[in-house]
Image: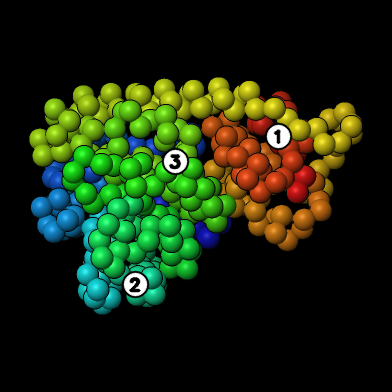
Amino acid sequence: FFKQMTAYELCLGLVGSEMCIRERFKMLLLVSVQNVDEAKQAIKGGADIVDVKNLQEALVGSAHPNIFKDVKKIAPDPIHSSLTLGVVPDQIGTVAMAVHAAGLLKATSVKVGFMKTEYNFALETLLACREALEGSNTMLIGSLFADNLIYDGGLDPSSMVDLSVEGKCDGFLIDTLVKDGRNLFDFIPESELKDMVMAAKSRGLSTALSGHLKLSDLDELARINPDIVGVRGAVCSKGDRDEGVYWEAVDHFKSELERKKVEGLKFTDNISVDKVLNQSSDDIKAEVVIDGKGKSCAGIIAALSEQISIDKTSIVEVIIPDKLNTYDVFLWAKNDNHSIMNQHTDEDGNLRILVKP
């Protein structure tokens, strides 16, 4: 059963209720917390994912196991509890052991971050972590920092997609380390982040962006459309990450994020259709059908990419149960020079799109 699901769906643990099925099509809000009190505030404010970390350990580090255990106890479904290991040392066995512990703690996901590391060493570390999670449902998330290149020997964040794929990760996180007022977009432009997110989704990876993000960044984030948006300072009391997470700030950020997603949905309704054939919609017949019901956005795009890599001539119909996924499908088609021939809504309310490779 698990092998039939995408990594993104497993990462979020979204199996079962109708509410969970709806949730997986949304841009989710991850809130970083350091203790149980902050976790309670994040949950009260409506966070989808509570990410436990230790901001006092080095640049960013891992929380004590007992703190994570206590957080997990108070996080009701469908809220997900994830662990951050932060910037990991160049000690493969030590990192793999920590990842194994995350699996035993039944974390939804564990993030392994690299700063001053050679690509091949980071890859070897992630592969060891993958092996350490064998038999666990905890998802492996590779992480690079957008500001890595300001440090001598910093691993280029542009290698994130390749590193995640080769390292057999379930997804990636791009974050920042600096604390001088600069954020994610000061180091990586929107266009580059959009390409990275789309490339990852086409490989079936979950995508998360973080790094001192604020409400003023929501327009850019909505256009990039990552699966997960991670924040801390923006949802702390007085906007100060050292003041602690405050539920009203979480609630406000979540509301604004939801509003941007609705605006993005309106945008998809206005996308023009390229009728590449002078035929009525009834005359255009799909030769292959991809049923996207029960799939995440990444799962749908990955299935489309795989099908077209095998067969570059057949017309493909993709069934999309939630319009929030159409933005990425249209963007994927545009980026890869595929033609959208037709789209219509069926009697069950599913959007059906015909794609010509």
- Badge nearest the viewer, 2 or 1: 2
Q: Residues within 10 Å of mark 3 (few under 14, many from 20)?
A: some
- Where does label 2 land, which residue? 118
Task: Name the amino acid type tagged 1.
Answer: Arg
Mark 3 and mark 2: Cα distance apart in space? 26 Å
> Relative to 291, is 251 on the left or the right?
left
Q: Is residue 45 above or below residue 151?
A: above
Instruction: Looking at the image, tell me whether mark 3 or mark 2 is earlier in sequence order.
Output: 2
Q: Residue at x 40, y 54 (%)?
A: 172
Determine whether, in the image, residue 240 is placed left or right of residue 274.
Answer: left
Occupied quadrant, residue 219: top left
Q: On the image, which quarter does residue 317 sit in? A: top right
Which SS class for mark 1?
Answer: strand
Q: Earlier in the sequence, mark 2 or mark 1?
A: 2
126 or 319, nearer to the observer: 126
- Total labels: the figure holds 3
Q: Which mark is residue 352?
A: 1
Q: Which residue is mark 3?
A: 190
Q: Position of residue 250 (x, y in %)?
A: 25, 29
> Residue at 59% across / 28% down in the picture?
268
